[in-house]
Image: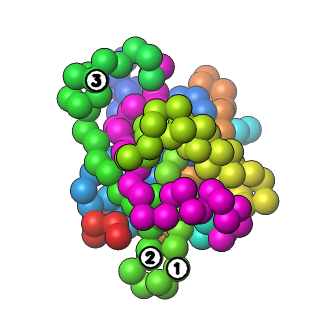
Amino acid sequence: MFVSNLKVDGKHIGSLPDGEMQFHIDQCYTAMPATGTCLYAMEIPSHGGDTLFSNLYAVWERLPADVRAKIEGRKAVHYFDYGATSRDAFSAADREALPHYAHPVGRVHPLSGRTALYVCRLMTDHIDGLPEDESRALLDRLFDAIEQPEFQYAHKWRVGDVLLWDNRCSAHARTDFDPNERRHLRRFTIQGEQPV
C-alpha cells in the first residue's frame, strides 16, 4: 500500500495522507498483529513528516516496580482507529463494532525472550480487569512513558530511504508536515504471531 497525500482525480491514492499521527503499533487491534513494517520513501516534504520510534523494551524495563506490579499478567484492549475520535463519542455498541483485540500489556518477544510494553495512545482503550478510572490513569502514565524523548529515535526521511522495524518491541509516530507538500511512501507489513 501507499502512505501518501498524493491524489489522482481528486482522491487519495494511499492511506494516512496528512498530519501528525500519535504513537501506535501496527495492527495491534488484530489477533495476529504485524511482526514488522517496511517503508520506502519516494517523495518527502521539506520539513516534518518524520517517523519517531520508541523502544518498548527500554520503556518496560524502566517502569517503576509499583506500575509493573499493576500490569503484570494483564491484557489491554486495542481498537482500530479508536484513538482518532473522542472516546466519549462511542457507545459500547459502537466500540464493539470496531475491529479490536486484547493482548498482554507486557509482550514477550518470541526471539529475544525480552518483555516489551505493548500499548499505544492511538489504539489502546483499556486494561482488562481494572476499573475504568484506574485503567485510564494507568494507561496515561504508560503512554507518557512511551513518549519520553530518552526512549526515542527520530528518523528524518530522505528520498530512497528504506526502514524496516519490529512492531513487537517498538511503537512509532509521525510528526506533522505541510499538507501542500508531497509525501509519498510505499508500505508493506509482515504478518506476525499472536502475542504472549
Q: Are marks 2 and 1 in contact (CB under 8 Å)?
A: yes
**Residue at the spot x=79%, y=59% of the render?**
150
Name the secondary structure under disc 2: loop
Name the secondary structure under disc 1: loop
- Mark 1 crowd level (few <14, some 14–19, many ≥20, 10 Å Cα): some
Query: As shown in the figure, which amino acid type bears the numbered disc 1?
Result: Arg
Q: Earlier in the sequence, mark 3 or mark 1?
A: 3
Distance between the alpha carbons at the discs numbered 2 and 3: 32 Å
Placement of 29 over or under 81, stated as above or below: below
| Farthest right residue in view | 150
Which mark is drawn over residue 109? 2
Placement of 61 over or under 9, stated as above or below: below
Q: Which residues are magenta?
A: 61-86
Mark 3 — residue? 92
Name the secondary structure under disc 3: helix
Q: Earlier in the sequence, mark 2 or mark 1?
A: 2
Q: Coloring scheme of the render?
A: rainbow
Q: Earlier in the sequence, mark 2 or mark 3?
A: 3
Placement of 191 over or under 175, stated as above or below: below
**In which quadrant of the rendered image does the C terminus lie?**
bottom left
Q: In this orientation, which residue lies closer to the viewer: 77 or 186?
A: 77
Which mark is drawn over residue 38? none
Q: Are marks 2 and 3 in contact (CB under 8 Å)?
A: no
Q: Is residue 153 visible?
A: no
Side of 8 where 22 appears, left or right: right
